[in-house]
């Protein structure tokens, strides 16, 4: 056992080919990767797994992982955040991540437990569709990117979104969650975020 995950063995990552610890969660992540490549038309180079997202909330800092970024035509058009259990509680932190990973609002946000999925509009957070099968295929995502206003996220908004995701993903995390990396807090001489 490592943390709260049962280690079954090792599994080869479908996207990168590297060996990963095989857990029930990782099996679901690999199924999602196969779905994206085999059924949704994305090439492996368009699927970016385990993307680090540094978060600063006041003096607190951490790095969390975003399961998948989908990048086509040089733009990240979709993120996918996996987590077991309820999808509704995962929507708000996933939306926050979609406002921090790039300097613009990522158009499509997917939260999934590996069995079901909620596909959200990144701009307004509204539910677009439900189900793993409803994750947008490549051609649909291309159309969404072309029609979406990739407007920049303001510094003030980014500060607020960082606090939201820190509260959900770090403060509320299980102490043995090894997908979160806590960083040393800022000292008095370090530069802090501002609301400007």
Image (cartoon, rainbow, N blue to C red):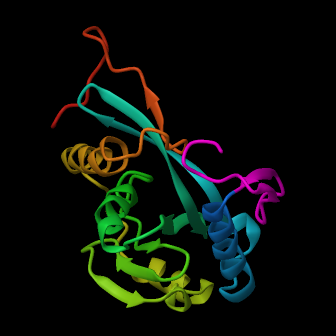
Instruction: Tell me if 190 is positioned left or right of 63 in this view.
Output: left
The residue drawn where x is 53% and y is 65% is 75
Residue nearest the observer in this picture, 181 or 135: 181
The furthest residue to the left: 195
Q: Quadrant of residue 122?
A: bottom left
The residue drawn where x is 63% and y is 70% is 28
Instruction: Tell me if 4 is positioned left or right of 24 in this view.
Output: left
Q: Is residue 96 above or below residue 179?
A: below
Q: Quadrant of residue 150?
A: bottom left
Image position, residue 19 (x, y; %):
82, 51
Image position, residue 135 (x, y; %):
52, 84
Q: Is residue 19 magenta?
A: yes
Q: Is residue 54 above or below residue 133?
A: above
- Counting every numbered tag in the picture gives 0
Q: Is residue 195 above or below residue 172?
A: above
Image position, residue 157 (x, y; %):
21, 51
Q: Quadrant of residue 8?
A: bottom right
The residue drawn where x is 41% and y is 45% is 174
Image position, residue 159 (x, y; %):
24, 43
Q: Is residue 10 magenta?
A: yes
Give the overall secondary structure of the magenta segment: loop
The span shown in magenta is 1-22
The residue drawn where x is 76% and y is 51% is 20
Quarter of the figure with the N terminus: top right
Residue nearest the observer in this picture, 56 or 139: 56
The furthest residue to the top: 189
Residue nearest the observer in this picture, 16 or 41: 16
Quarter of the figure with the C terminus: top left
Residue nearest the observer in this picture, 73 or 8: 8
Q: Is residue 100 above or below residue 85?
A: above
């Amino acid at each position: 056992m490592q943390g709260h995950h049962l280690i079954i063995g090792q599994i080869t990552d479908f996207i990168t080919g590297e060996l990963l610890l095989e857990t029930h969660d990782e099996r679901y992540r690999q199924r999602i990767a196969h779905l994206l490549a085999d059924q949704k038309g994305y090439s492996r180079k368009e699927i970016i797994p385990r993307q680090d997202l540094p978060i600063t909330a006041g003096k607190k800092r951490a790095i969390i992982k975003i399961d998948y970024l989908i990048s086509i035509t040089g733009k990240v058009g979709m993120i996918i955040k996996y987590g077991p259990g309820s999808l509704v509680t995962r929507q708000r932190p996933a939306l926050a991540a979609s406002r921090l990973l790039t300097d613009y609002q990522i158009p499509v946000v997917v939260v999934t437990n590996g069995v079901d999925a909620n596909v959200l509009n990144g701009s307004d957070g509204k539910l677009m569709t439900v189900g793993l099968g409803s994750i947008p295929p490549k051609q649909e995502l291309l159309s969404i990117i072309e029609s979406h206003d990739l407007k920049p996220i303001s510094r003030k908004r980014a500060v607020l979104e960082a606090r939201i995701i820190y509260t959900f993903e770090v403060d509320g995390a299980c102490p043995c969650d090894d997908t979160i990396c806590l960083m040393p807090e800022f000292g008095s001489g370090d530069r802090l975020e501002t609301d400007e």
